[in-house]
Image (tube, helix red, strand yellow):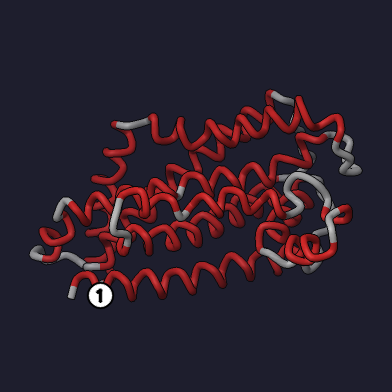
Amino acid sequence: MTTHFFADTGVLLGRSMRHITRSVDTIITTTIMPIMFLLLFVYVFGGAIQTGSDSYVNYLLPGILIMTVASGISYTAYRLFLDMQGGIFERFQSMPIARSSVLWAHVLTSLVANLCSVVVVVLVALLMGFRSSAGLASWLAVAGIVILFTLALTWLAVIPGLTAKTIDGASAFAYPLVFLPFISSAFVPTDGMPGPVRAFAEHQPVTSIVNAIRDLFAQQPVGTGIWVALAWCVGILIVTYAFAMAAYRRKIT
């Protein structure tokens, strides 16, 4: 049964990846906004923002990576909605394949596409002066956090992809996620924020994740911060996966 699932997922993943390679503009579109924010904040606002860091691009990049993922997952909901409306799911149900492999193919496609976008953003940041003394272990830890966060948000994207009534509704859910980093430590330290805003910023997942990535890049002690970030990622992943599978079961029964 397990072998059957992996084989089916691999075949369907190939199908989804072919769609991505035929429309590379998806990855380009996903990276444009984060890169524009990177350029805007570093070269326009960076000189007026006090972060206590020698390089503002070093301070800013972790938040931009989160924004890149948040903007990329809307395409998962979009592609899933189109498949639902096109009757692809009904055809797959008539075939002897593992039913969950259909969703996993979309999720893994989203993971690959978003990681490509993240790499592009990091390369642009390097051209803008981003430097890190992090070793291989720290880079792998950053990659692990980004992968977990991408999986968590992608399963969140599956829910509107399955339940939305219109194509706009399927992708519009990502807008609040894209702007959530603005109310966090992604762009400025939370110390100068008004009381209620600061309380929200310090206790939402983006701040924990951004701070953990920033400390790893800077080779700073991460302490319990990395476990808090991982707990947020795993917690969101478990909850969104459960809700997505429940929505999927309702659709196919």
User: Residue 101 at x, y = what percent?
Assistant: 27, 62
Give the amino acid type for the residue marked by disc 1 in the picture.
Arg
Give the image quarter of residue 204: bottom right
Q: Is residue 131 left or right of residue 66?
A: right
User: Residue 86 at x, y = what percent?
Assistant: 16, 51
Q: Is residue 222 left or right of residue 204?
A: right
Give the image quarter of residue 217: top right
Give the image quarter of residue 164: bottom left
Q: Measuring 50% from the left and 67% from the top, which residue is drawn there?
A: 237
Q: Measuring 46% from the left and 55% from the top, which residue is drawn there?
A: 173
The residue under label 1 is 250
Q: Is residue 46 above or below residue 145?
A: above
Report the quarter where the N terminus lies: bottom left
Question: Is any atom of residue 216 visible in this view?
Answer: no
Q: Measuring 56% from the left and 69% from the top, which residue is drawn there?
A: 234
User: Residue 156 at x, y = what percent?
Assistant: 45, 62
At label 1, counting other C-alpha atoms closer than 10 Å, the crowd grade (few under 14, some 14-19, many 20 or more) is few
Q: Is residue 151 above or below residue 127?
A: below
Q: What element carries label 1?
A: helix
Q: How many marks?
A: 1
Q: Is residue 174 left or right of residue 4?
A: right
Q: Measuring 28% from the left and 69% from the top, which residue is drawn there?
A: 248
User: Residue 180 at x, y = what percent?
Assistant: 63, 54
Which one is nearer the viewer's eye here, 235 or 43?
Answer: 43
